[in-house]
Amino acid sequence: MQPQKNEQEWEQVNGLDRAFASRFAKNMFFTLLTIVMLSFIGSRFFTHLDLNLYGYMVGTIIFLAGFFYRFMAWAERPPTKVFIQKGKKLLFRKNTASTSVDHMVSHKFIWNRGIYRWTQHMLIGWGCILSCFVTFPLVFGWMYFTMAENGMYTVVFMSIDVMEVRADGLLAWLFYNALNISAIMVIAGVCMALYRRLKNEKQCAEQTFIYDFMPLYLLLFISVSGLLLTVTNVFFAGFMQPTISLIHQYAVIVTLIYLPFGKLAHIPIRPLSVLAKNYKLHYGEQEMKKCHHCGNEFIAAEQSADVIDVLRQNGMEYKTEDGVHLAELCLPCRRETRLQMFKHASASMLSVGRGERT
Amino acid sequence: MTKSVLYLELDNCIGCRSCLAACTQCGGHDEKYRNYVVDVNPLVDTQTMPLMCLHCVNPACARSCPAQAIQIHETGAVLSARVEKCIGCQNCTIACPYGIPKFDVEQNLMYKCDLCIERTQHDIPPMCASVCPTNTLQWLTKEQLAMKKEQNVLDNGKWIASSDHYLENETNVHISLPGILQKKQKLF
């Protein structure tokens, strides 16, 4: 929720912001405007829109509303704001590309957590990304196929004839079956994840149906219903195809609406890890914080100051008797300080009250 | 909230580090321990004290997490960072006033004591308290804790481990200070 602006603040707001009731409204408007413009260009003035897919369009708009609602509030949290504001200024560092690949493409950190988990995550993650890359350009008319001469398909992307492929060639086969391939990837990944969740004791204890299982079941349902469309077309002459198509479409829409609010919300959060890495590297190179007790460098000075500020905003100010903030001590010294505090406040020096001590 | 709470009687610690060994065996801890046993006066005497996450009611680690990866269980336990959300910024390690969270650089992941949530949510003692041979770590019912409080109240009306004196904030884990058992017959 944005705080109400007073008169002076309104004067500082620029003209464009004045046109909208809130930042949410502004973001929604410009995002939708961009999509409409891209569709206008991509579909050659709306002449190549596939209206069979209009349900996904509506689903996407509702998803965007949920996305902005959830993540605009998230981005306003004091610690998040620090990383976004400082991190985006450091986007042009040399290591951004390699960090982005590690964190968002190859998921190296998940590999380090276990090969099984990495495999399931790669299958689910890349299966979903592949399906999005195919579905959304088709929905908004950014990509479509035309047949200029018999036996050859022309792939059109953003109104540009990108390539011609043989209708019975390997490349065309991959195009037709991209969603089937992605569905198989997701089904395999989800089955691995479900197996792990049912077998791993720690997972069994912590997981909840709504948070941990529902996204897996949703992805499974979408993938299976999507594959059924192919099965019914190829083996059953399209039996119940329109019904399955609608069920599949509804499942996708429900998942899109759910995405910003459940476990899948980690997808939009992940790019922040690249900003955080840049932030740590950049400010670490500038100045490291020396522990007030032992003098060891333990974290970037900027980050230490930022955390102290974030805690202050949350009404937390943890200081030692000599006025040093605990965030200015390295972890071993912080533990040492606490224990010394316990030791010197020994109960033997205090008068303990009534009752038989047992 | 669970029926029971974790209570640390620092006087009892003999430095056996059974709690650390037990911690490694908790499901999901990947054989890494998440608490500490510290020598209070190294090379002077053998006094040791355990230190672990005190599961603050208003945890600084969660407040400082930009990804909302640290969540509070309905029992009051402050859980380890959710693996899918943790972005490896280490804000939590800087924010914690007790210096508890650990960071795995390879996995880009913070991990900390989760009070063995798969056990404690069913009122089973956490691994550390289950194995502590000297009752330093105790899993007490609310009634037992009230008895301790009654026994250890100071003449100024404060409890021996009242938060405003020796801790930074209100915590779900309770601590009694060393010396509380002095001149007292121990039952173990």
Image: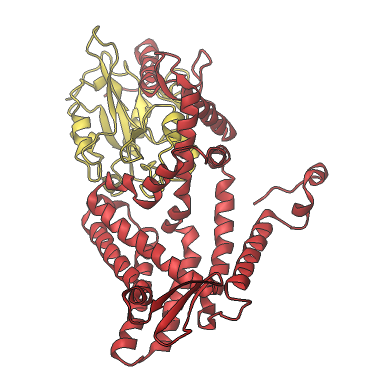
Viewport quadrant of the C terminus of chain A: top left
The hue used for chain B is yellow
Residue A49 shown left or right of residue A116 in the figure: right
Q: Quadrant of residue A312?
A: top right
Residue B109 visible, this angle: yes
* Residue drawn at x 53%, y 42% as measured from the top left: A80
Location of residue A47 with respect to A266 vertically, above or below = below
Q: Residue furthest front?
A: A149
All told, the count of numbered labels is 0
Residue B136 in percent (x, y) is at 25, 26
Return the residue found at the far top. Answer: B44
Is residue A233 placed above or below A183 in the rendered structure?
below
Expressed as whole percent of the image width and height from the top left, the position of residue A339 reads: 36, 18
| Left or right of B169 in this view: A210 | left
Give the vertical position of A263 relative to B123 (above or below).
Answer: below
Res B58 visible: no
Q: Colour of chain A?
A: red
A334 or A300: nearer the eye?
Answer: A300
Q: Which residue appears at 32% of the width and 71% of the height?
A: A181
For the residue pair A134 and A122, the one nearer the viewer reads as A134
Quadrant in which residue A171 is drawn: bottom left
| Residue pictured at 57% horizontal, 63% vertical | A64
Residue A179, image x, y percentages: 37, 73
